[in-house]
Amino acid sequence: MMKNKPVVIGVTGGTASGKTTVSHAIFDHFSKNSVLLLEQDSYYKDQSKMTMAQRRAVNYDHPLAFDTDRLIQDLKKLLKRQAIDKPIYDYKVLNRSAEVIHEEPRDVIILEGILILDDPRLRDLMDIKVFVDTDDDVRIIRRIQRDMRERDRTLTNIIDQYLTTVKPMYHQFVEPTKRYADLIVPDGGKNQVAIDLLVTKVRDILQKKQTIN
Ligand SMILES: Nc1ncnc2c1ncn2[C@@H]1O[C@H](COP(=O)(O)OP(=O)(O)O)[C@@H](O)[C@H]1O
Ligand SMILES: Nc1ccn([C@@H]2O[C@H](COP(=O)(O)O)[C@@H](O)[C@H]2O)c(=O)n1
């Protein structure tokens, strides 16, 4: 019997708004074999041929930093119930790793990233679009803590990057995509009502798809 098209949930918002936390909270409500998490960051362009100095100079908050064609190609494959080889991103070396993760298609795909609603081709593949809305001051505090702890960054480097690219790109490219969201979630992963609503909606879509076929 032909399997139904998977449900695609897009989760966006500024850096450190809580996208990953929300995505994991949704993920935890389903069985591991039925949900796939796809991070837009995995699809940063390959920078193997660049020096470390050149990599440091890249604007990672601009739509052109991403290999969006490959992301769309992979998402379309998953929608056709085909497996993909997902790239792995390493924030410490500012590049994709040489390895990939083989991912089997799943009933629910959660696509998470700062610019997933910027490209209409990606938006068109989503069933539910979510914008995690967190104040800028809270986000920069979280980013400092996280990037020093997990991404091998110094305070000076984080502040400099934030002021030169992260903040202006947020206002130019990320925040304007809020208008495309079906749901705006304040408080991110701690917003239990929003998480419950999303889980209920996903279950509803899955059930309808099963009934139709
Ligand atoms: N509601 C919250 N309260 C406190 N800390 C949070 C909350 N949501 C996320 N964080 C923390 O903030 C950091 C960034 O959150 P994350 O979900 O990774 O954001 P994003 O994926 O949008 O970059 C992480 O260290 C996470 O643990
Ligand atoms: N080499 C890189 C690649 C990306 N970034 C930053 O990551 C942010 C997106 O990830 P979130 O988990 O915070 O959504 C983005 O704002 C980039 O600036 C980086 O610093 N270095």
Image (tube, rainbow, N blue to C red):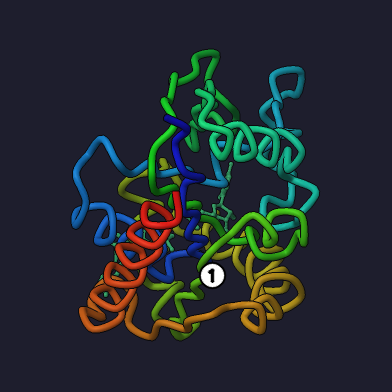
SS of the residue under disc 1: strand
| Residue found at x 39% / y 37% | 106
**Residue 176, x across and y down, in percent:** 71, 80
In the image, farthest residue toward the top: 98
**Residue 65, x across and y down, in percent:** 74, 45
| Residue found at x 43% / y 65% | 16
Say few, some or many: other residues with alpha carbon within 10 Å of mark 1 (under 14 / 14 to 19 / 20 or more): many
Picture quadrant of residue 19: bottom left
Task: State the residue position of label 1.
Answer: 129
**In front here: 191 or 51?**
191
**Residue 11, x across and y down, in percent:** 48, 63
Residue 129 seen in the figure: yes
**In front here: 100 or 158?**
100
Q: Quadrant of the N terminus?
A: top left
Which amino acid type is marked by label 1?
Lys
| Residue found at x 66% / y 84% | 179
Residue 144 seen in the figure: no
5 left or right of 177 in image: left
How many marks can you see? 1
